[in-house]
Image (cartoon, rainbow, N blue to C red):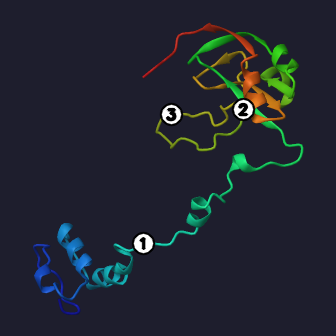
Amino acid sequence: MAVGQRPAPSGKLNLERLEGNLPGQLYDALLAVHWRCVSRAAIILLTMTTRYFGKPIKRNEDPRLLTGRAQFTDDVDLPNMLHAAFLRSDYAHARITAIDVHQAQARPGVVAVYTADDLGDYWQPGPLLLPPPPIERREFHQATQVPLAKGKVRHVGEAIAVVVAESRYIAEDALADIVVEFEPLPAIVA
């Protein structure tokens, strides 16, 4: 195709004329895709990027991952570091009638156990991290996510209590010592 020449009005490109002028993989790609309008600029752009087709690309993170030298969050160990684990609701909708954390607090290695009542003035709804898109004639309450459930749970997995301990394993084991009494409420499921 000559400079400035446009494809036929039908939108079909005469790929046979391009054969031999383009790298094989680019030519094959053009054959596989229906092009309504291909300009010379698009062909030049594709030709310039063909050096990556079918060739390995060196990734910066591979040597660390493949040799076992990568560091993940669980690998971080700082002096006097504490770990937290959250007790979460098994109910989609339920009233919390009682929470007993005394056994969890008595477990060796547990530093603190917090419920919504322990947070005092810090228990406030926070802003949504990702607000919903605007919908006509609908109002969304932007501050609806609370740190810990207070009085009732509104979805499965809502945090009820948090255990802070000397190790991750002690914190997770202490969750089993927390006794929560629920009064199930009707749930809306879709």
Q: Vertically, is 64 above or below 182?
A: below
Q: Dots 3 and 2: beta carbons under 8 Å?
A: no
Residue marked by disc 3: 138
Q: Nearer the viewer, mark 3 or mark 2?
A: 2
Residue 184's spot in the image, x, y percent? 59, 8
Residue 135's spot in the image, x, y percent? 47, 39
Q: Pick whichever of labels 3 and 2 is earlier in the sequence.
A: 2
Label 3: element kind? loop
Residue marked by disc 2: 125
Residue type at mark 3 is Arg
Residue 18's spot in the image, x, y percent? 17, 85
Label at residue 182 = none
Label 2: element kind? loop
Q: Does residue 154 appear to the left or right of 74 in the view shown?
A: left
Residue type at mark 1 is Pro
The image quadrant that residue 63 belongs to is bottom right
Residue 59 in sight here: yes
Residue 175's spot in the image, x, y percent? 73, 22
Q: Vertically, is 76 above or below 110?
A: below
How far apart are labels 2 and 1 at the CA level? Answer: 48 Å
How far apart are labels 3 and 2 at the CA level? Answer: 20 Å
Name the residue nearer the viewer: 33 or 120. 33
Q: Dots 2 and 1: beta carbons under 8 Å?
A: no
Q: Pick whichever of labels 2 and 1 is earlier in the sequence.
A: 1
- Give the residue at x 66% y 32%: 145
Residue marked by disc 1: 56
